Image: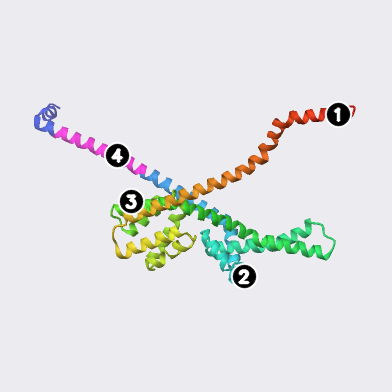
Amino acid sequence: MTLFFEWFVSPRHACLALALLAAAAASLVLGMGLIRRARMQTRQARRLDQAVAARAGRVLERRRSNGWRVWIAQLGARGVASALGRSLVAGEDRLLLDQCAVNHPAGQAWFFLARTVLGFGMPALGLVVVPHDTVLESCGIVFFGFGTGYMVPKWVMRRRAAARRRHADEEMPLLVDLLRLLQGVGLSVDQTIQLIEQDFGTAMPVLSSELAHAEAQFRSGLPRAASLQRFATIYRNADMASVAELIVQVDRFGGAVQTPLQQFGERMRERRRSDMKARIGQLTVKMTGVMVLTLLPALIVVTGGAGFLAIFRSLSRMGGG
């Protein structure tokens, strides 16, 4: 025991013992850290598996819920490919669907189904609901029901196309300013369009989607002029056609476009200002008619009411009342 104590209290052996204790403590701390890390990884893997399983379940449930929609779209696609479908979804209707950004197989299929169901369903509903006694009345119900059901989808898509044309016209000044700014800092045409598509989709939903479509066509191998053909002609907007032509020239020849874009933006704002003045003038004329219809009767009652009352009283006295 004395020898062991002497060996332990000697400086050399004490340092060795302390080193062994420090190594053991470090090993213990390292082992606890590795165990904790392994537990965290196991817990994260379990959570990840649960999230993946839940998402797979949601995707499967969504696919099951959308199964009938897919089946109906496939049925409509077969109808569009038939002779009846080509007559119900004509070239003018496809242009309208293109302006609404739904000119794809699913959009054409739903448009065809809407026209078919309403075109044949509304006459049947009219024959059930509207009373008819003669053959002529039945023919009239069928004729007007079919015409109304045939035109309702087109009226709806026409309203949506008009709204998109209006939004595109309102977004044009912002697009011109962005093109001037991004071209001024030295970005290429591709970088400019990609930046507008990625960062300004919420501010310009219509024009950014059209530029994204044009950029996708350009990446697929079409020339710049051919890829921007839809952008220039889809909404029949002269400003969009001018911007498309300017983008094509810059992509082909290069050069500074800040000054032309600034002049184009100022001319566009001046045109919009004159259009707003014209609208204000039309609104003033309309308000005159409203004022005549609403304020004139009240003004006659207030100004001439006492005179009319006096005349009525005089007439009543003359009649012996």
Q: Nearer the viewer, residue 163 or 48?
A: 163
Q: Secondary structure at mark 2?
A: helix
Nearer mark to the viewer, of 3 and 2: 3
Give the percent coordinates (x, y) of residue 17: 16, 33
Real-space Cα separation, disc 3 to disc 2, in angstroms: 47 Å
Residue corresponding to mark 1: 316
Residue corresponding to mark 3: 181
| Residue segment shown in magenta | 16-40
Q: Amino acid at mark 3?
A: Leu
Which of disc 2 and disc 4 is earlier in sequence? 4
Residue 198 at least partly seen:
no
Nearer mark to the viewer, of 3 and 4: 3
Q: Secondary structure at mark 3?
A: helix
Which of disc 2 and disc 1 is earlier in sequence? 2
Q: Is residue 25 left or right of residue 180?
A: left
Residue corresponding to mark 2: 87
Q: Amino acid at mark 1?
A: Ser
Q: Please name the residue shown 84% across and 30% down the image.
A: 315
Q: Is residue 130 magenta?
A: no
Q: Nearer the viewer, residue 136 or 299?
A: 299
